[in-house]
Amino acid sequence: MSYGNSIFSARATHNWLLEQQNIIGWTYSINYEALENYSVIRIIAGRKLDPPDSRVRYAGNVHIKCYIGGRDALIGSYNLTAPTIEDCCVRITKRAELQHLRKEFEIHWKHLKP
């Protein structure tokens, strides 16, 4: 599916997330429903998940929402656990920017406790 725009509404963000496989990234909070609804393989969250899950690592004070898929990424205000109609995201498609996001994620992930 082609979205055509660089700015995604909450509905377009939700649809993009559902289409992705193996999402990595950052979000403020996560719950088990979001982990099951989306193909999240690893996420860094600003709030702890109770009980813990191996796909989630806690990093205090994370407020960024960045979801990295296979060919593009979204950065914006869309929170996986409580999205609102006002949420929007910017789509990142440039290869160098995606590589940078993935590299930063891997560095951050490795420095957090499982």
Image (cartoon, rainbow, N blue to C red):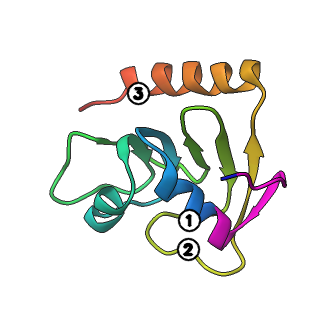
Where does the magenta region start and end? 2-12
Q: Residue at x 27, y 30 (%)?
A: 113
Mark 1 and 3 residues: CB-CB less than 8 Å, in contact? no
In this view, the mark in front (2 or 1): 1
Element under label 3?
helix
Residue drawn at x 56%, y 18% as measured from the top left: 103
Q: Quadrant of residue 70?
A: top right
- How dense is the environment of label 1, judged by Cα within 10 Å: few (below 14), some, or many (20 and up)? some
Q: Relative to 48, does residue 101 appear above or below in the rendering?
A: above
Q: Quadrant of residue 44?
A: top left
Q: Nearer the viewer, residue 20 or 90?
A: 20
Q: Nearer the viewer, residue 105 or 20?
A: 20
Q: Which residue is labeled 2 in the image? A: 83
**Mark toward the viewer: 1 or 3:** 1
Residue furthest front in the image: 1
| Amino acid at circle 2 | Pro
Say which amino acid is labelled 1.
His
Residue 36 image position (x, y, % from top left): 28, 59
Q: Is residue 13 magenta?
A: no
> For mark 1, what is the residue?
14
Q: Is residue 2 left or right of residue 32?
A: right
Q: Are marks 2 and 1 in contact (CB under 8 Å)?
A: yes
Q: Is residue 57 above or below residue 28?
A: above
Mark identifier at residue 73: none
Which residue is at 41% across, 27% downward? Answer: 109
Mark 3 is on which residue type? Trp
Q: Eyeballing the image, is 25 above or below 107?
A: below
Identify the residue under disc 3: 109
Q: CA distance from mark 2 to mark 1?
A: 9 Å
